Amino acid sequence: MNFDGFTQEDFAIFTIEGLDARMAAIRERIQPKFRAIGEELKNDIALSLGNEMFLHIAKHARRTVNPPKDSWLAISHNKRGYKAHPHFQVGLFDDHVFIWLAFIYELPYKKEIAQKFIDNIDSVKALIPKDFVISLDHTKKEAVAVSDVSSKEFEGMLDRFRNVKKAEFLVGRHIKAGDPILKDGNEFLHSAKSTIETLLPLYRLSLT
């Protein structure tokens, strides 16, 4: 399918009561859109990096009672999974879309990545636009605007990412549910590609 944008009905899925009912709606409405978005982004990223990338769509398979508060696609260089690797995400909560470069706690070498970022902290911070946001926990909606983060606070975030086992580091963009860009599939894809392109140098640094 072609991606023709997100609607308010897509966001309303995350207010549906019950695991089975919400998951049925995610599979029916959201996952086909994720596949359309992900296939295009995956090919773009692969072209930029010069190596194959793989699309993963969240299955929420471990859930037995509580319905998911969000859902997402992930793009990784690993065919079998993404959580143990730096990866890109596009997903939804009930009030916004997120586009992330994600380093989550399952990374077996996150301490080394964090140290690399700390060692290059000035250039790392310079790579991230002021209108981007940072999250330290992928399970929560909250994120802080880069423009509001001082150099000392940024170093503290990376220090926590390095030293706290469950700490994470995600950087990218939030787009509010009511933003007109979400209703236009081409516009959204352009914005997602631009966001990821901006984050590719940071992704490359994490792998070197």
Image: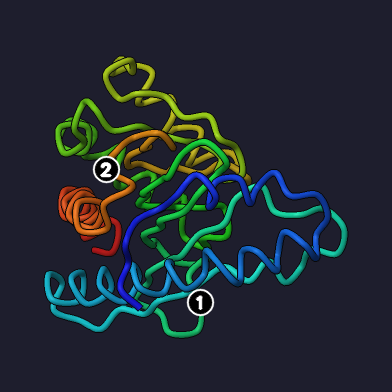
User: Secondary structure beneath disc 1?
Assistant: loop
In the rendered view, tell whether residue 10 sits above or below residue 61: above
Residue 85's spot in the image, x, y percent? Answer: 44, 66
The label number, if any, that marks residue 81 in the structure image: 1
In this view, the residue in front, 87 or 66, is 66
Which residue appears at 28% of the width and 64% of the height? 207
> Position of 169 compared to 179: left or right?
right
Q: What is the image's colouring?
A: rainbow
Image quarter (top left, top right, bottom left or bottom right) of the N terminus: bottom left
User: Secondary structure beneath disc 2?
Assistant: helix
Which residue appears at 40% of the width and 56% of the height? 90
Determine if residue 65 is in view: yes
Q: Disc 2 designates what residue? A: 181
Which residue appears at 70% of the width and 44% of the height? 15
Q: Nearer the viewer, mark 2 or mark 1?
A: 2
Residue pushed farthest right? 65
In this view, the residue in front, 149 or 46, is 46
> Position of 35 compared to 205: left or right?
right
The amino acid at mark 1 is Gly
**Mark 2 or mark 1: which comes first in sequence?**
1
Q: Tags 2 and 1 in contact by the CB under 8 Å rule?
A: no
Res. 58 image quadrant: bottom right
Image quarter (top left, top right, bottom left or bottom right) of the C terminus: bottom left
Residue 129's spot in the image, x, y percent? Answer: 18, 32
Residue 66's spot in the image, x, y percent? Answer: 82, 53
Which residue appears at 70% of the width and 65% of the height? 23
